[in-house]
Amino acid sequence: MRKLYRNARLQDVDALQDILVEDGKFAGIAPHIETEGAEVIDLAGRLTLPPYVEPHIHLDCVYTGLQDGAANRSMTLFEGIKNWSTVKATVSVGEMKERAKRAIREEMSHGVQFIRTHVDVTNPKQTSLKALLELREELKDLVTIQIVAFPQEGIYSFPNGAALLEEALRMGADCVGAIPHYELAREFGEKSLHKVVELAQKYDKLIDAHCDETDDDQSRFLELLTALTYQAGIGDRTTASHTCSFGSANGAYAFRLMKTLVKAKLSFVSCPTENISLEGRQDSYPKRRGLTRVKELHDAGINVCFAQDSIADPWYPLGNGNLMNILDHGIHICQMMSFAEIDHAFDLITVNSARALHILDQYGIEEGKPANFIVLDADSPFEAIRQRADVLRSVHGGEELFVREPARIETDIPLLRADASSTTDKNYKIITDKA
Ligand code: 17E
Ligand code: FE2
């Protein structure tokens, strides 16, 4: 099976490139490739990227926020956890799989091909884990799913929390999770991080901890997670998710911690839509944004990426798995709005997330790697973001997952006809010429 994709606009490459795909892999990338017997597809200069990576979503909870009684009235993290606790008591593996599958379909239809999901293991029945283990296997040819054993109600605050977490690792979860800011006391939170590091080493797993998802500037579990993983030599196998309180930390504290973060090489996941909504709820005005220091982490060379986190669950009513939407919110909220930042913003939902997931060996548009890529309805990263461009094509292991027709409007009005073109190069040139 040979396919030749002509005229791809790759990021940071001046000339358009032809991409030859053979046996599911990138077999050649060059300005012009001649080959016989290959199916030829003209990408017409459209932006071609490695696939979107969803680094953080709770697939066991999706759509349950739409159920009676699960809606979050205070819109706080804590009410969400309480409502989810009620929901999870009665949910079945089959029902959970159906909901999770629907969310995976939504994510994939927007160009996601890799997903890290947190599944709640503070459940003696391990319903969430069983559902996602089955889906990980059933869907493995279409989408890579990584599972985090996530102790939603605490490792030392939920009965047998530590044993359930360890059981989940033995059952096949890929990563160890934590929630130190939710534990009943600071000491429990600290103990929980020691446990997570111990388990990660014992079972050779990655770490992805919900860490400091609160505006409380005294919540400083990130410091301990960083120190422990750094000393254990597993900093680069560790992800700190949310870390909201780091956005409230004072400058002197942040300055000190930032130095350890650079050394330890942790990855960070920020959830812009989720935390702009959940945090700041106890503030009057001025009201905090609730996100971690994304821009500063990024500028310090620390790996940071954006995630959806929720789809219509007890914490967040919206969400559709479109990481372009998340990116758009994220760069606004984090003030990453210079032209240079916008030009490289896609890293925040592609390669940086892939680094957090430890999948870089199979990720990227390079000869010899699996032929995974997406094509956007725009001719540059800047225009793609300005227009919130759709993903028009998603190719996974050389197979077309989907092709989407560009959106067009019907009109007799010449003014509107000119603008209706889905290729945006003309708009871009007009703007830059005027500047
Ligand atoms: N659980 C949690 O602890 N935090 C969140 N943001 C979600 C679930 C969605
Ligand atoms: Fe989360």
Image: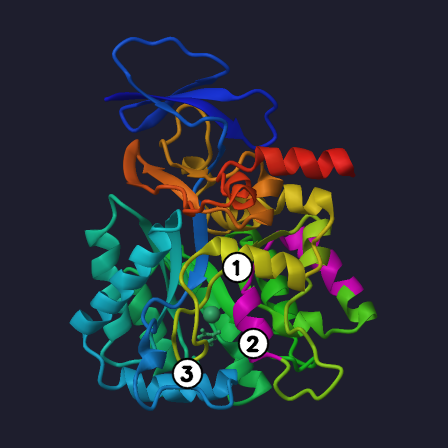
Using a 10 Å C-alpha cutoff, classify the residue at mark 1 as few (fewer than 14 neighbours), some (14 to 19) or many (20 or more). Answer: many
Residue under circle 3?
A: 153
Residue 131: name its quadrant.
bottom left
The amino acid type, in three-letter code, at marker 2 is Ser
Q: Nearer the viewer, residue 317 or 266?
A: 317
**Mark closer to the chain start, 1 or 3:** 3
The amino acid type, in three-letter code, at marker 3 is Glu
| Residue 71: image location, x then y, percent | 39, 86
Numbered badge on residue 277: 2
Residue 168 is covered by the magenta coloring: no
Q: Mark 1: which secondary structure?
A: helix
Q: Nearer the viewer, mark 3 or mark 2?
A: 2
Residue 269 is covered by the magenta coloring: yes
Residue 415: name its quadrant.
top right
Cα gap from disc 1 to disc 3, whole angstroms: 27 Å
Q: Residue at x 67, y 73 (%)?
A: 289
Q: How many marks?
A: 3
| Residue 6: image location, x then y, percent | 42, 21
Instruction: Tell me whether the residue at label 1 lies in contact with that at label 3, contact meaning CB atoms closer than 8 angstroms.
Output: no
Q: Nearer the viewer, residue 6 or 87?
A: 6
| Residue 273: image location, x then y, percent | 54, 68
Q: Mark 2: which secondary structure?
A: helix
The residue most toward the front is 412
Residue under circle 1?
A: 326
| Residue 360: image location, x then y, percent | 47, 40
Cα gap from disc 2 to disc 1, whole angstroms: 13 Å
Instruction: Give above or below for 328 relative to 122.
Output: above
Instruction: Give above or below for 53 relative to 126.
Output: above
Which quadrant: the N terminus?
top left
Q: Nearer the viewer, residue 111 or 387?
A: 387
